[in-house]
Amino acid sequence: MIGAGGIGGYYGARLQQAGHEVVLVARGEHLAAMQRQGLRVEHQEFHFAQPVRALDLTTLRETCASGDFDLVVLAMKSQATGPLMAELADWLAASEVPVLSLQNGVDNEPLISEVVGEERTLGGLAVRIGGHIVAPGLVQADGPAQVIMGAWPQRRSAQADWLEQLRQCFELAGIPTQVAVDIRRELWRKLIINNGVNPLSALSGLDTRRLSHHPQLGRSVYQMMTETAAVAEADGVALGKTDVDEMYALIRNFDAIKTSMLVDKEKGRELELDAISGAVLRRAEQLGLEVPATRLAYGLLQLRD
Ligand SMILES: NC(=O)C1=CN([C@@H]2O[C@H](COP(=O)(O)OP(=O)(O)OC[C@H]3O[C@@H](n4cnc5c(N)ncnc54)[C@H](OP(=O)(O)O)[C@@H]3O)[C@@H](O)[C@H]2O)C=CC1
Ligand SMILES: CC(C)(CO)C(=O)C(=O)O
Protein backbone atom coordinates (compact mmCIF):
# COMPACT_ATOMS: atom_id res chain seq x y z
CA MET A 1 0.00 0.00 0.00
CA ILE A 2 1.97 2.97 -1.28
CA GLY A 3 0.83 6.12 0.52
CA ALA A 4 -0.59 4.72 3.74
CA GLY A 5 -2.46 7.87 4.79
CA GLY A 6 -6.20 8.29 5.32
CA ILE A 7 -7.22 5.97 2.49
CA GLY A 8 -4.20 3.65 2.33
CA GLY A 9 -4.05 3.30 6.11
CA TYR A 10 -7.75 2.40 6.38
CA TYR A 11 -7.85 -0.15 3.53
CA GLY A 12 -4.41 -1.53 4.46
CA ALA A 13 -5.57 -2.13 8.03
CA ARG A 14 -8.74 -3.86 6.81
CA LEU A 15 -6.64 -6.21 4.64
CA GLN A 16 -4.13 -6.96 7.41
CA GLN A 17 -6.93 -7.63 9.90
CA ALA A 18 -8.30 -10.19 7.42
CA GLY A 19 -4.98 -12.03 7.47
CA HIS A 20 -3.19 -10.61 4.43
CA GLU A 21 0.47 -9.66 4.65
CA VAL A 22 0.45 -5.93 4.02
CA VAL A 23 3.41 -3.58 3.60
CA LEU A 24 2.56 0.08 4.21
CA VAL A 25 4.72 2.70 2.51
CA ALA A 26 4.76 6.15 4.07
CA ARG A 27 7.23 8.80 5.19
CA GLY A 28 7.95 11.42 7.83
CA GLU A 29 6.45 11.44 11.31
CA HIS A 30 3.55 9.18 10.32
CA LEU A 31 5.99 6.49 9.15
CA ALA A 32 8.12 6.87 12.28
CA ALA A 33 5.03 6.54 14.51
CA MET A 34 3.82 3.40 12.66
CA GLN A 35 7.27 1.84 12.97
CA ARG A 36 7.45 2.70 16.69
CA GLN A 37 3.95 1.88 17.89
CA GLY A 38 2.01 0.38 14.98
CA LEU A 39 -1.03 1.79 13.19
CA ARG A 40 -4.32 2.71 14.82
CA VAL A 41 -7.48 3.10 12.75
CA GLU A 42 -10.74 4.38 14.23
CA HIS A 43 -13.97 3.85 12.34
CA GLN A 44 -17.52 3.42 13.61
CA GLU A 45 -17.47 -0.30 12.78
CA PHE A 46 -13.77 -1.08 12.70
CA HIS A 47 -11.09 -0.54 15.33
CA PHE A 48 -7.54 -1.52 14.53
CA ALA A 49 -4.41 -1.19 16.65
CA GLN A 50 -1.63 -3.50 15.54
CA PRO A 51 2.04 -3.53 14.69
CA VAL A 52 2.45 -3.07 10.94
CA ARG A 53 5.28 -3.47 8.47
CA ALA A 54 5.85 0.16 7.48
CA LEU A 55 8.67 1.23 5.16
CA ASP A 56 9.81 4.24 3.19
CA LEU A 57 9.95 3.93 -0.58
CA THR A 58 13.71 3.42 -0.75
CA THR A 59 13.62 0.62 1.80
CA LEU A 60 10.74 -0.99 -0.09
CA ARG A 61 12.83 -1.01 -3.26
CA GLU A 62 15.93 -2.27 -1.49
CA THR A 63 14.42 -4.96 0.72
CA CYS A 64 11.46 -6.31 -1.27
CA ALA A 65 11.01 -7.44 -4.85
CA SER A 66 7.85 -6.33 -6.64
CA GLY A 67 7.21 -10.02 -7.36
CA ASP A 68 6.81 -10.60 -3.59
CA PHE A 69 3.40 -8.94 -3.84
CA ASP A 70 0.06 -10.02 -5.34
CA LEU A 71 -0.99 -6.40 -5.72
CA VAL A 72 0.55 -2.93 -5.46
CA VAL A 73 -1.98 -0.27 -4.43
CA LEU A 74 -1.37 3.46 -4.95
CA ALA A 75 -3.03 5.70 -2.36
CA MET A 76 -0.93 8.85 -2.42
CA LYS A 77 -2.31 12.18 -3.64
CA SER A 78 -2.52 12.23 -7.45
CA GLN A 79 0.26 14.78 -7.97
CA ALA A 80 2.67 12.09 -6.67
CA THR A 81 1.71 9.44 -9.26
CA GLY A 82 4.00 10.52 -12.11
CA PRO A 83 7.18 10.93 -10.02
CA LEU A 84 6.45 7.77 -8.03
CA MET A 85 5.89 5.63 -11.13
CA ALA A 86 9.17 6.94 -12.57
CA GLU A 87 10.95 6.07 -9.34
CA LEU A 88 9.45 2.56 -9.23
CA ALA A 89 9.72 1.77 -12.96
CA ASP A 90 12.73 -0.59 -12.69
CA TRP A 91 11.42 -2.20 -9.52
CA LEU A 92 8.04 -2.88 -11.16
CA ALA A 93 9.64 -4.10 -14.40
CA ALA A 94 11.07 -7.12 -12.57
CA SER A 95 7.64 -8.77 -12.15
CA GLU A 96 4.10 -8.91 -13.47
CA VAL A 97 2.43 -7.55 -10.34
CA PRO A 98 -0.73 -5.52 -11.10
CA VAL A 99 -0.97 -1.91 -9.91
CA LEU A 100 -4.29 -0.57 -8.60
CA SER A 101 -4.92 3.13 -8.06
CA LEU A 102 -7.39 4.13 -5.35
CA GLN A 103 -6.81 7.82 -6.01
CA ASN A 104 -9.16 10.59 -7.05
CA GLY A 105 -8.82 12.07 -10.51
CA VAL A 106 -8.94 10.69 -14.04
CA ASP A 107 -5.27 10.94 -15.02
CA ASN A 108 -3.58 8.38 -12.76
CA GLU A 109 -4.25 5.21 -14.76
CA PRO A 110 -2.60 6.49 -17.99
CA LEU A 111 0.54 7.31 -15.96
CA ILE A 112 0.54 3.83 -14.42
CA SER A 113 -0.06 2.08 -17.71
CA GLU A 114 2.75 4.02 -19.39
CA VAL A 115 5.11 2.26 -17.00
CA VAL A 116 3.60 -1.21 -16.49
CA GLY A 117 1.30 -1.53 -19.52
CA GLU A 118 -2.49 -1.73 -19.66
CA GLU A 119 -2.62 -5.46 -18.81
CA ARG A 120 -1.21 -4.70 -15.34
CA THR A 121 -3.15 -1.47 -14.72
CA LEU A 122 -6.28 -1.47 -12.57
CA GLY A 123 -8.32 1.66 -12.22
CA GLY A 124 -10.06 2.20 -8.94
CA LEU A 125 -11.56 4.55 -6.46
CA ALA A 126 -12.36 4.83 -2.81
CA VAL A 127 -16.01 5.75 -2.47
CA ARG A 128 -18.19 6.95 0.41
CA ILE A 129 -15.24 7.29 2.73
CA GLY A 130 -13.69 10.20 4.56
CA GLY A 131 -10.37 9.06 5.99
CA HIS A 132 -7.55 11.17 7.39
CA ILE A 133 -4.36 10.98 9.42
CA VAL A 134 -5.37 12.84 12.59
CA ALA A 135 -2.07 12.27 14.41
CA PRO A 136 1.07 10.39 13.39
CA GLY A 137 0.17 6.69 13.37
CA LEU A 138 -3.56 7.37 13.77
CA VAL A 139 -6.17 7.31 10.98
CA GLN A 140 -9.81 8.24 11.50
CA ALA A 141 -12.33 7.11 8.89
CA ASP A 142 -16.07 7.50 8.28
CA GLY A 143 -18.59 6.03 5.88
CA PRO A 144 -19.17 2.58 4.36
CA ALA A 145 -15.75 2.85 2.67
CA GLN A 146 -16.33 1.02 -0.57
CA VAL A 147 -14.04 0.32 -3.50
CA ILE A 148 -14.88 0.31 -7.19
CA MET A 149 -12.22 -1.14 -9.44
CA GLY A 150 -11.78 -2.47 -12.94
CA ALA A 151 -9.36 -3.30 -15.72
CA TRP A 152 -7.96 -0.20 -17.40
CA PRO A 153 -9.19 1.18 -19.72
CA GLN A 154 -12.05 -1.31 -19.96
CA ARG A 155 -13.03 -4.84 -18.96
CA ARG A 156 -10.88 -7.61 -20.45
CA SER A 157 -12.36 -11.08 -20.21
CA ALA A 158 -8.92 -12.62 -19.55
CA GLN A 159 -8.81 -10.78 -16.21
CA ALA A 160 -12.38 -11.44 -15.11
CA ASP A 161 -11.61 -14.40 -12.82
CA TRP A 162 -8.64 -12.73 -11.18
CA LEU A 163 -10.61 -9.52 -10.56
CA GLU A 164 -13.44 -11.53 -9.07
CA GLN A 165 -10.97 -13.21 -6.68
CA LEU A 166 -9.61 -9.80 -5.73
CA ARG A 167 -13.14 -8.50 -5.16
CA GLN A 168 -13.86 -11.44 -2.86
CA CYS A 169 -10.62 -10.83 -0.89
CA PHE A 170 -11.65 -7.21 -0.35
CA GLU A 171 -15.21 -8.18 0.59
CA LEU A 172 -13.92 -10.75 3.11
CA ALA A 173 -11.79 -7.97 4.58
CA GLY A 174 -14.93 -5.87 5.18
CA ILE A 175 -14.44 -3.65 2.12
CA PRO A 176 -17.64 -3.55 0.02
CA THR A 177 -16.24 -3.85 -3.51
CA GLN A 178 -17.61 -3.70 -7.02
CA VAL A 179 -15.88 -4.58 -10.27
CA ALA A 180 -16.79 -2.06 -12.96
CA VAL A 181 -16.99 -2.89 -16.65
CA ASP A 182 -16.01 0.67 -17.57
CA ILE A 183 -13.80 2.05 -14.80
CA ARG A 184 -13.07 5.26 -16.71
CA ARG A 185 -16.77 6.15 -16.48
CA GLU A 186 -16.74 5.46 -12.71
CA LEU A 187 -13.66 7.66 -12.27
CA TRP A 188 -15.43 10.48 -14.06
CA ARG A 189 -18.56 10.03 -11.95
CA LYS A 190 -16.37 10.34 -8.86
CA LEU A 191 -14.71 13.44 -10.34
CA ILE A 192 -18.19 14.99 -10.50
CA ILE A 193 -18.24 14.74 -6.70
CA ASN A 194 -14.65 15.82 -6.16
CA ASN A 195 -14.76 18.86 -8.42
CA GLY A 196 -18.16 19.67 -6.92
CA VAL A 197 -17.11 19.72 -3.28
CA ASN A 198 -13.35 19.55 -2.76
CA PRO A 199 -12.32 23.03 -4.05
CA LEU A 200 -15.31 24.82 -2.48
CA SER A 201 -14.78 23.05 0.85
CA ALA A 202 -11.12 24.10 0.84
CA LEU A 203 -12.14 27.70 0.08
CA SER A 204 -15.01 27.89 2.57
CA GLY A 205 -13.82 25.59 5.35
CA LEU A 206 -17.21 23.84 5.27
CA ASP A 207 -17.74 20.07 5.51
CA THR A 208 -19.60 18.28 2.70
CA ARG A 209 -23.00 18.48 4.37
CA ARG A 210 -22.89 22.18 5.32
CA LEU A 211 -21.43 23.04 1.92
CA SER A 212 -23.93 21.09 -0.18
CA HIS A 213 -26.87 22.38 1.90
CA HIS A 214 -25.66 26.01 1.89
CA PRO A 215 -28.26 28.14 0.04
CA GLN A 216 -25.67 29.80 -2.26
CA LEU A 217 -22.67 27.46 -2.22
CA GLY A 218 -24.85 24.37 -2.67
CA ARG A 219 -25.85 25.76 -6.07
CA SER A 220 -22.21 26.37 -6.94
CA VAL A 221 -21.47 22.74 -6.03
CA TYR A 222 -24.17 21.69 -8.48
CA GLN A 223 -22.77 24.01 -11.15
CA MET A 224 -19.24 22.64 -10.77
CA MET A 225 -20.64 19.13 -10.95
CA THR A 226 -22.48 20.04 -14.17
CA GLU A 227 -19.28 21.52 -15.64
CA THR A 228 -17.41 18.30 -14.81
CA ALA A 229 -20.03 16.11 -16.48
CA ALA A 230 -19.93 18.30 -19.60
CA VAL A 231 -16.18 17.92 -20.17
CA ALA A 232 -16.08 14.12 -19.66
CA GLU A 233 -16.91 13.96 -23.36
CA ALA A 234 -13.25 14.87 -24.06
CA ASP A 235 -12.35 11.39 -22.75
CA GLY A 236 -15.20 9.73 -24.65
CA VAL A 237 -17.37 9.42 -21.53
CA ALA A 238 -21.02 10.47 -21.84
CA LEU A 239 -22.35 11.88 -18.58
CA GLY A 240 -25.52 13.87 -18.17
CA LYS A 241 -27.95 15.46 -15.74
CA THR A 242 -28.92 12.08 -14.27
CA ASP A 243 -25.30 11.46 -13.21
CA VAL A 244 -25.01 14.97 -11.77
CA ASP A 245 -28.29 14.65 -9.86
CA GLU A 246 -27.22 11.25 -8.50
CA MET A 247 -23.82 12.50 -7.32
CA TYR A 248 -25.35 15.68 -5.87
CA ALA A 249 -27.91 13.65 -3.90
CA LEU A 250 -25.18 11.25 -2.76
CA ILE A 251 -23.02 14.00 -1.30
CA ARG A 252 -25.97 15.87 0.26
CA ASN A 253 -27.12 12.69 2.00
CA PHE A 254 -23.62 11.47 2.97
CA ASP A 255 -22.06 11.96 6.43
CA ALA A 256 -20.75 15.45 7.16
CA ILE A 257 -17.08 15.00 6.35
CA LYS A 258 -14.10 17.17 5.64
CA THR A 259 -12.89 16.67 2.09
CA SER A 260 -9.30 15.59 1.57
CA MET A 261 -8.59 19.00 0.00
CA LEU A 262 -9.91 20.85 3.04
CA VAL A 263 -7.73 18.70 5.30
CA ASP A 264 -4.68 19.42 3.11
CA LYS A 265 -5.51 23.12 3.17
CA GLU A 266 -5.78 23.14 6.97
CA LYS A 267 -2.46 21.32 7.26
CA GLY A 268 -0.74 23.70 4.82
CA ARG A 269 -0.04 20.84 2.39
CA GLU A 270 -0.03 20.97 -1.39
CA LEU A 271 -3.58 20.66 -2.76
CA GLU A 272 -4.68 17.97 -5.20
CA LEU A 273 -6.01 20.81 -7.35
CA ASP A 274 -4.45 19.97 -10.68
CA ALA A 275 -5.82 16.41 -10.64
CA ILE A 276 -9.33 17.62 -9.82
CA SER A 277 -10.17 21.11 -11.15
CA GLY A 278 -7.12 21.16 -13.43
CA ALA A 279 -8.35 17.98 -15.12
CA VAL A 280 -11.71 19.67 -15.81
CA LEU A 281 -10.10 22.90 -17.08
CA ARG A 282 -7.79 21.04 -19.47
CA ARG A 283 -10.69 19.13 -21.03
CA ALA A 284 -12.81 22.32 -21.23
CA GLU A 285 -10.05 24.01 -23.20
CA GLN A 286 -9.77 21.00 -25.48
CA LEU A 287 -13.53 21.12 -26.17
CA GLY A 288 -13.77 24.94 -26.31
CA LEU A 289 -16.26 24.98 -23.41
CA GLU A 290 -16.57 27.55 -20.63
CA VAL A 291 -16.41 26.23 -17.05
CA PRO A 292 -16.61 29.51 -15.10
CA ALA A 293 -17.23 28.16 -11.60
CA THR A 294 -14.38 25.65 -11.86
CA ARG A 295 -12.07 28.32 -13.26
CA LEU A 296 -12.89 30.72 -10.43
CA ALA A 297 -12.36 28.14 -7.67
CA TYR A 298 -9.14 26.92 -9.32
CA GLY A 299 -7.80 30.48 -9.63
CA LEU A 300 -8.62 31.36 -6.02
CA LEU A 301 -7.05 28.17 -4.67
CA GLN A 302 -3.94 28.61 -6.79
CA LEU A 303 -3.47 32.03 -5.20
CA ARG A 304 -3.70 30.46 -1.75
CA ASP A 305 -1.66 27.29 -2.48
N1 LIG B 1 -9.04 11.25 2.37
C1 LIG B 1 -10.25 10.92 1.90
O1 LIG B 1 -11.25 10.95 2.62
C2 LIG B 1 -10.39 10.49 0.49
C3 LIG B 1 -9.31 10.54 -0.37
N2 LIG B 1 -9.43 10.03 -1.63
C4 LIG B 1 -8.28 10.05 -2.52
O2 LIG B 1 -7.35 9.05 -2.09
C5 LIG B 1 -6.01 9.47 -2.37
C6 LIG B 1 -5.22 9.47 -1.06
O3 LIG B 1 -5.75 10.49 -0.23
P1 LIG B 1 -5.47 10.58 1.32
O4 LIG B 1 -5.55 9.24 1.93
O5 LIG B 1 -6.33 11.66 1.83
O6 LIG B 1 -3.95 11.06 1.30
P2 LIG B 1 -2.99 11.27 2.56
O7 LIG B 1 -2.26 12.53 2.24
O8 LIG B 1 -3.74 11.15 3.83
O9 LIG B 1 -2.03 10.03 2.46
C7 LIG B 1 -1.03 9.88 1.52
C8 LIG B 1 0.20 9.44 2.25
O10 LIG B 1 1.17 9.07 1.29
C9 LIG B 1 2.40 9.62 1.68
N3 LIG B 1 3.29 9.74 0.52
C10 LIG B 1 3.14 10.51 -0.57
N4 LIG B 1 4.19 10.33 -1.40
C11 LIG B 1 4.99 9.42 -0.80
C12 LIG B 1 6.24 8.85 -1.16
N5 LIG B 1 6.85 9.16 -2.29
N6 LIG B 1 6.81 7.95 -0.31
C13 LIG B 1 6.20 7.63 0.84
N7 LIG B 1 5.02 8.16 1.23
C14 LIG B 1 4.43 9.04 0.41
C15 LIG B 1 2.03 10.98 2.25
O11 LIG B 1 3.08 11.54 3.00
P3 LIG B 1 3.17 13.15 3.17
O12 LIG B 1 2.09 13.49 4.14
O13 LIG B 1 4.55 13.35 3.69
O14 LIG B 1 2.95 13.75 1.82
C16 LIG B 1 0.81 10.57 3.10
O15 LIG B 1 1.16 10.05 4.34
C17 LIG B 1 -6.13 10.86 -3.01
O16 LIG B 1 -6.14 10.75 -4.41
C18 LIG B 1 -7.49 11.35 -2.50
O17 LIG B 1 -8.08 12.31 -3.34
C19 LIG B 1 -10.58 9.43 -2.07
C20 LIG B 1 -11.67 9.35 -1.25
C21 LIG B 1 -11.70 9.95 0.05
C1 LIG C 1 -15.50 14.04 -1.15
C2 LIG C 1 -14.90 12.74 -0.74
C3 LIG C 1 -14.87 12.59 0.74
C4 LIG C 1 -15.82 11.63 -1.22
O1 LIG C 1 -15.40 10.35 -0.85
C5 LIG C 1 -13.53 12.62 -1.32
O2 LIG C 1 -13.32 11.88 -2.25
C6 LIG C 1 -12.40 13.46 -0.82
O3 LIG C 1 -12.47 14.01 0.28
O4 LIG C 1 -11.41 13.58 -1.56
Image (cartoon, grey):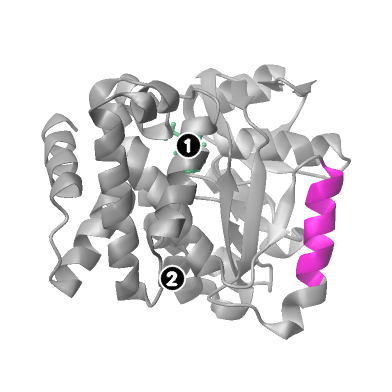
Residue at 77% over, 23% down: 45
283 left or right, relative to 154: left
Position of 174 with respect to 299 (left or right) is right
Q: Is residue 270 visible?
A: no
Viewport quadrant of the C terminus: top left
Quarter assignment of residue 165: bottom right
Front one among 10 and 287: 287
Q: Residue at x 26, y 46 (%)?
A: 223
> Local crowd at mark 1 within 10 Å, few (<14), some, or many (≥20)?
many
Q: To which residue does mark 2 refer?
A: 110
Viewer-side residue, 259 vs 210: 210
Quickly name the residue at label 1: 251
State the image quarter where residue 259 is shown.
top left
Does the stretch in magenta take in 106?
Answer: no
Instruction: Measuring from the top left, give residue 56's x and y in whole percent.
Output: 56, 39
Q: Is residue 219 left or right of residue 140?
A: left
> x%, y% of residue 3?
54, 41
User: Is residue 34 shown to the viewer in this render?
Assistant: yes
SS at mark 2 in the image? helix
> What amino acid type is highlighted by mark number 1?
Ile
Distance (Cα) linking label 2 and label 1: 27 Å
Q: Are marks 2 and 1 in contact (CB under 8 Å)?
A: no
- Amino acid identity at mark 2: Pro
Compared to 47, does 164 lie above or below? below
Query: Which portion, as a residue range, is magenta?
Result: 162-173
Residue positioned 63% across, 46% down in the render: 1
Q: Residue at x 76, y 67 (%)?
A: 163
Q: x and y percent of residue 114 in the render?
A: 45, 75
- Whether the residue carrying mark 1 lies under 8 Å from ligand 2 is answered with yes
Which label lies toward us, 2 or 1?
A: 1
The main secondary structure of the magenta stretch is helix
